Image: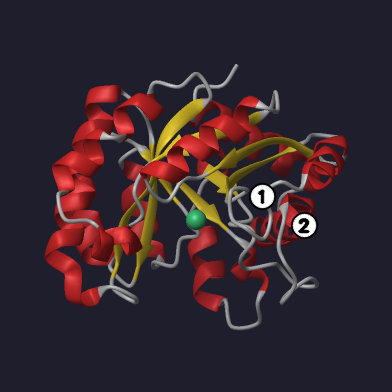
Protein backbone atom coordinates (compact mmCIF):
# COMPACT_ATOMS: atom_id res chain seq x y z
CA UNK A 1 0.00 0.00 0.00
CA UNK A 2 1.42 3.35 -1.02
CA UNK A 3 1.33 5.82 1.85
CA UNK A 4 -0.14 9.31 1.51
CA UNK A 5 1.61 12.65 2.06
CA UNK A 6 -0.58 15.19 3.89
CA UNK A 7 1.01 18.29 2.34
CA UNK A 8 -0.92 20.86 4.37
CA UNK A 9 -1.94 20.61 8.01
CA UNK A 10 -1.87 22.70 11.17
CA UNK A 11 -0.75 20.45 14.01
CA UNK A 12 0.23 23.49 16.09
CA UNK A 13 -3.44 24.56 16.15
CA UNK A 14 -4.89 24.24 19.66
CA UNK A 15 -7.40 21.61 18.46
CA UNK A 16 -4.54 19.23 17.56
CA UNK A 17 -1.42 20.40 19.39
CA UNK A 18 0.03 17.99 21.92
CA UNK A 19 -2.00 14.98 20.75
CA UNK A 20 0.95 12.61 20.42
CA UNK A 21 -1.23 9.51 20.47
CA UNK A 22 -3.18 10.74 17.45
CA UNK A 23 0.02 11.36 15.47
CA UNK A 24 1.39 7.94 16.39
CA UNK A 25 -1.84 6.31 15.16
CA UNK A 26 -1.79 8.36 11.96
CA UNK A 27 1.79 7.38 11.11
CA UNK A 28 0.99 3.73 11.92
CA UNK A 29 -1.87 3.92 9.38
CA UNK A 30 -1.90 5.04 5.76
CA UNK A 31 0.03 8.32 6.20
CA UNK A 32 3.70 8.33 5.27
CA UNK A 33 4.50 12.04 5.56
CA UNK A 34 2.99 15.21 7.02
CA UNK A 35 3.85 18.86 6.46
CA UNK A 36 2.65 21.15 9.23
CA UNK A 37 2.25 24.68 7.86
CA UNK A 38 3.01 27.87 9.76
CA UNK A 39 0.86 31.01 9.90
CA UNK A 40 3.26 33.52 11.54
CA UNK A 41 6.81 33.85 12.90
CA UNK A 42 6.08 32.34 16.35
CA UNK A 43 4.16 29.49 14.75
CA UNK A 44 7.11 28.87 12.39
CA UNK A 45 9.26 28.14 15.44
CA UNK A 46 6.56 25.86 16.89
CA UNK A 47 6.13 23.96 13.60
CA UNK A 48 9.88 23.31 13.30
CA UNK A 49 10.05 22.09 16.91
CA UNK A 50 7.06 19.77 16.43
CA UNK A 51 8.42 18.37 13.15
CA UNK A 52 11.71 17.58 14.91
CA UNK A 53 9.86 15.05 17.08
CA UNK A 54 8.70 12.84 14.17
CA UNK A 55 10.94 11.39 11.52
CA UNK A 56 8.44 11.95 8.68
CA UNK A 57 6.96 15.26 9.75
CA UNK A 58 8.17 18.43 8.03
CA UNK A 59 7.47 22.11 8.56
CA UNK A 60 7.10 25.37 6.69
CA UNK A 61 7.86 28.89 7.91
CA UNK A 62 5.82 31.86 6.76
CA UNK A 63 3.26 34.57 7.48
CA UNK A 64 -0.39 34.03 6.47
CA UNK A 65 -2.21 37.00 4.88
CA UNK A 66 -4.80 37.02 7.68
CA UNK A 67 -2.02 38.12 10.06
CA UNK A 68 -1.71 41.47 8.26
CA UNK A 69 -3.68 43.53 10.81
CA UNK A 70 -1.17 42.62 13.54
CA UNK A 71 1.95 43.60 11.57
CA UNK A 72 3.35 47.13 11.70
CA UNK A 73 6.79 46.59 10.12
CA UNK A 74 6.57 44.12 7.23
CA UNK A 75 10.33 43.82 6.40
CA UNK A 76 11.21 43.29 10.09
CA UNK A 77 8.49 40.64 10.51
CA UNK A 78 9.56 38.75 7.36
CA UNK A 79 13.23 38.90 8.44
CA UNK A 80 12.28 36.89 11.55
CA UNK A 81 11.53 33.92 9.27
CA UNK A 82 15.12 33.50 8.09
CA UNK A 83 16.28 31.49 11.10
CA UNK A 84 13.28 29.11 10.88
CA UNK A 85 13.76 28.62 7.13
CA UNK A 86 17.27 27.39 7.89
CA UNK A 87 15.92 24.66 10.23
CA UNK A 88 16.66 21.12 9.01
CA UNK A 89 12.96 20.10 9.02
CA UNK A 90 11.76 23.25 7.22
CA UNK A 91 11.07 22.39 3.56
CA UNK A 92 8.96 25.33 2.34
CA UNK A 93 8.02 28.95 2.84
CA UNK A 94 4.32 29.31 3.68
CA UNK A 95 1.61 29.68 3.98
CA UNK A 96 1.64 33.01 2.18
CA UNK A 97 -0.60 34.76 -0.31
CA UNK A 98 -3.70 36.94 -0.44
CA UNK A 99 -7.08 36.71 1.29
CA UNK A 100 -9.72 39.11 0.03
CA UNK A 101 -12.49 37.23 1.81
CA UNK A 102 -11.39 38.18 5.33
CA UNK A 103 -8.94 41.03 4.76
CA UNK A 104 -9.97 42.94 1.63
CA UNK A 105 -9.40 46.30 3.38
CA UNK A 106 -5.69 45.51 3.69
CA UNK A 107 -5.11 44.46 0.08
CA UNK A 108 -2.12 46.79 -0.52
CA UNK A 109 -0.36 45.69 2.69
CA UNK A 110 -1.10 42.03 1.95
CA UNK A 111 0.57 42.36 -1.45
CA UNK A 112 3.68 43.85 0.20
CA UNK A 113 3.83 41.02 2.73
CA UNK A 114 3.33 38.43 -0.02
CA UNK A 115 5.96 39.92 -2.36
CA UNK A 116 8.51 40.25 0.41
CA UNK A 117 8.11 36.56 1.20
CA UNK A 118 8.30 35.53 -2.47
CA UNK A 119 11.62 37.41 -2.67
CA UNK A 120 12.83 35.57 0.44
CA UNK A 121 11.81 32.21 -1.06
CA UNK A 122 13.82 33.00 -4.20
CA UNK A 123 16.82 33.89 -2.06
CA UNK A 124 16.48 30.79 0.14
CA UNK A 125 15.75 28.56 -2.88
CA UNK A 126 12.66 27.09 -1.21
CA UNK A 127 9.24 26.21 -2.68
CA UNK A 128 6.23 28.20 -1.44
CA UNK A 129 2.77 27.22 -0.18
CA UNK A 130 0.12 29.63 -1.45
CA UNK A 131 -3.15 30.64 0.20
CA UNK A 132 -5.39 32.38 -2.37
CA UNK A 133 -8.92 33.19 -1.25
CA UNK A 134 -11.01 35.31 -3.61
CA UNK A 135 -7.80 36.94 -4.89
CA UNK A 136 -7.07 34.79 -7.95
CA UNK A 137 -6.01 37.60 -10.33
CA UNK A 138 -3.69 39.48 -7.94
CA UNK A 139 -2.17 36.24 -6.63
CA UNK A 140 -1.40 35.11 -10.16
CA UNK A 141 0.18 38.49 -11.08
CA UNK A 142 2.62 38.34 -8.17
CA UNK A 143 3.52 34.68 -8.80
CA UNK A 144 4.06 35.44 -12.51
CA UNK A 145 6.73 38.02 -11.56
CA UNK A 146 8.76 35.19 -10.00
CA UNK A 147 8.38 32.76 -12.89
CA UNK A 148 11.56 30.68 -13.20
CA UNK A 149 12.72 31.75 -9.72
CA UNK A 150 10.05 30.37 -7.38
CA UNK A 151 7.66 27.42 -7.69
CA UNK A 152 5.34 25.86 -5.19
CA UNK A 153 1.84 24.63 -4.53
CA UNK A 154 -1.56 26.31 -4.77
CA UNK A 155 -3.06 24.92 -1.57
CA UNK A 156 -6.79 24.08 -1.23
CA UNK A 157 -7.20 25.67 -4.64
CA UNK A 158 -10.53 27.25 -5.57
CA UNK A 159 -9.68 28.88 -8.91
CA UNK A 160 -10.97 27.90 -12.34
CA UNK A 161 -9.53 25.22 -14.60
CA UNK A 162 -7.97 27.88 -16.91
CA UNK A 163 -5.94 29.25 -13.98
CA UNK A 164 -4.90 25.72 -13.03
CA UNK A 165 -3.53 25.21 -16.55
CA UNK A 166 -1.52 28.45 -16.28
CA UNK A 167 0.08 27.35 -13.00
CA UNK A 168 0.84 23.90 -14.38
CA UNK A 169 2.55 25.54 -17.38
CA UNK A 170 4.76 27.52 -14.97
CA UNK A 171 5.83 24.31 -13.20
CA UNK A 172 3.52 24.60 -10.19
CA UNK A 173 1.66 21.94 -8.21
CA UNK A 174 -2.04 22.09 -7.30
CA UNK A 175 -3.49 20.71 -4.09
CA UNK A 176 -7.08 19.96 -3.15
CA UNK A 177 -8.49 19.49 0.35
CA UNK A 178 -11.63 17.97 1.86
CA UNK A 179 -13.93 20.64 0.41
CA UNK A 180 -13.69 18.85 -2.93
CA UNK A 181 -15.87 16.09 -1.48
CA UNK A 182 -18.70 18.52 -0.62
CA UNK A 183 -21.85 18.53 -2.75
CA UNK A 184 -21.33 22.09 -4.09
CA UNK A 185 -17.73 21.51 -5.23
CA UNK A 186 -18.41 21.26 -8.98
CA UNK A 187 -15.87 23.99 -9.81
CA UNK A 188 -13.12 22.28 -7.80
CA UNK A 189 -13.96 18.98 -9.48
CA UNK A 190 -13.56 20.60 -12.92
CA UNK A 191 -10.29 22.24 -11.84
CA UNK A 192 -8.98 18.87 -10.65
CA UNK A 193 -9.47 17.42 -14.11
CA UNK A 194 -7.12 20.13 -15.46
CA UNK A 195 -4.21 18.90 -13.31
CA UNK A 196 -1.89 16.22 -14.71
CA UNK A 197 -1.16 13.31 -12.35
CA UNK A 198 2.46 14.43 -11.92
CA UNK A 199 1.39 17.84 -10.52
CA UNK A 200 -1.36 17.01 -8.06
CA UNK A 201 -1.01 16.92 -4.27
CA UNK A 202 -3.44 16.07 -1.47
CA UNK A 203 -3.92 17.72 1.90
CA UNK A 204 -6.26 17.90 4.87
CA UNK A 205 -5.75 21.57 5.93
CA UNK A 206 -6.64 20.08 9.32
CA UNK A 207 -8.14 20.82 11.81
CA UNK A 208 -10.41 22.52 9.22
CA UNK A 209 -12.52 21.17 6.37
CA UNK A 210 -13.01 17.49 7.24
CA UNK A 211 -14.05 15.59 4.10
CA UNK A 212 -17.35 13.74 3.63
CA UNK A 213 -18.24 11.46 5.52
CA UNK A 214 -16.47 13.21 8.44
CA UNK A 215 -17.70 16.72 7.57
CA UNK A 216 -18.12 18.89 10.68
CA UNK A 217 -15.67 16.85 12.79
CA UNK A 218 -12.18 18.00 13.80
CA UNK A 219 -10.13 17.04 10.78
CA UNK A 220 -6.78 15.19 10.92
CA UNK A 221 -4.50 13.29 8.53
CA UNK A 222 -6.29 10.00 9.31
CA UNK A 223 -9.18 11.34 7.18
CA UNK A 224 -6.98 12.17 4.18
CA UNK A 225 -7.79 8.91 2.37
CA UNK A 226 -11.42 10.05 1.88
CA UNK A 227 -10.20 13.07 -0.10
CA UNK A 228 -7.60 10.97 -1.92
CA UNK A 229 -10.16 8.33 -2.92
CA UNK A 230 -12.59 10.99 -4.13
CA UNK A 231 -9.92 12.83 -6.13
CA UNK A 232 -8.57 9.61 -7.67
CA UNK A 233 -12.15 8.86 -8.73
CA UNK A 234 -12.52 12.29 -10.37
CA UNK A 235 -9.32 11.68 -12.35
CA UNK A 236 -10.33 8.11 -13.16
CA UNK A 237 -7.10 6.78 -11.63
CA UNK A 238 -6.70 3.70 -9.47
CA UNK A 239 -6.29 4.66 -5.77
CA UNK A 240 -2.93 2.95 -5.35
CA UNK A 241 -1.47 4.71 -8.40
CA UNK A 242 -2.90 8.02 -7.17
CA UNK A 243 -1.40 7.61 -3.67
CA UNK A 244 1.97 6.68 -5.14
CA UNK A 245 1.99 9.62 -7.58
CA UNK A 246 0.87 12.29 -5.09
CA UNK A 247 3.44 11.20 -2.50
CA UNK A 248 6.21 11.18 -5.12
CA UNK A 249 5.11 14.65 -6.32
CA UNK A 250 5.24 16.09 -2.79
CA UNK A 251 8.66 14.59 -2.10
CA UNK A 252 9.95 16.07 -5.34
CA UNK A 253 8.52 19.55 -4.63
CA UNK A 254 9.77 19.65 -1.03
CA UNK A 255 13.08 17.92 -1.91
CA UNK A 256 12.62 15.05 0.55
CA UNK A 257 14.64 11.86 -0.03
ZN1 LIG B 1 -3.58 26.26 6.04
Marker disc for residue 9: none
Q: Quadrant of residue 127?
A: top left
Q: Position of residue 70 (x, y in %)?
A: 27, 61
Q: Position of residue 15 (x, y in %)?
A: 67, 60
| Residue 58 appears in the rendering | yes
Marker disc for residue 223: 2
Front-most of residues 149 and 187: 149
228 up-or-down from 62: above or below: below
Q: Position of residue 84 (x, y in %)?
A: 40, 29
- Residue that mark 1 sits on: 17
Q: Is residue 7 left or right of residue 169?
A: right
144 up-or-down from 93: above or below: below
Query: Residue drawn 19% across and 35% down?
Result: 119
9 up-or-down from 226: above or below: above
Front-most of residues 227 and 216: 216
Q: CA distance from mark 2 to mark 1?
A: 17 Å
On-image quarter of the C terminus: top right
Query: Residue drawn 50% across and 41% down?
Result: 199
Say whether marks 2 and 1 touch (CB < 8 Å): no
Which type of secondary structure does the marked residue at label 1 adopt? loop
Q: Neighbour class for label 1 at 10 Å: few (<14), some, many (≥20)?
A: few
Query: Residue drawn 80% across and 34% down?
Result: 2
Amino acid sequence: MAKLFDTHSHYTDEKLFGNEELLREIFAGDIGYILTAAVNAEDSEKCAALASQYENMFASAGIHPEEIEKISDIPAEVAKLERYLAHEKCVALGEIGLDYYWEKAYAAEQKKLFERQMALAAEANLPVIIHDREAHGDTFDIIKKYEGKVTGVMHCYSGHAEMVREYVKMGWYISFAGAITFKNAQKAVESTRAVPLDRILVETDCPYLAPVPKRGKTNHSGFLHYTAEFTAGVLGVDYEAFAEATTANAKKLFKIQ
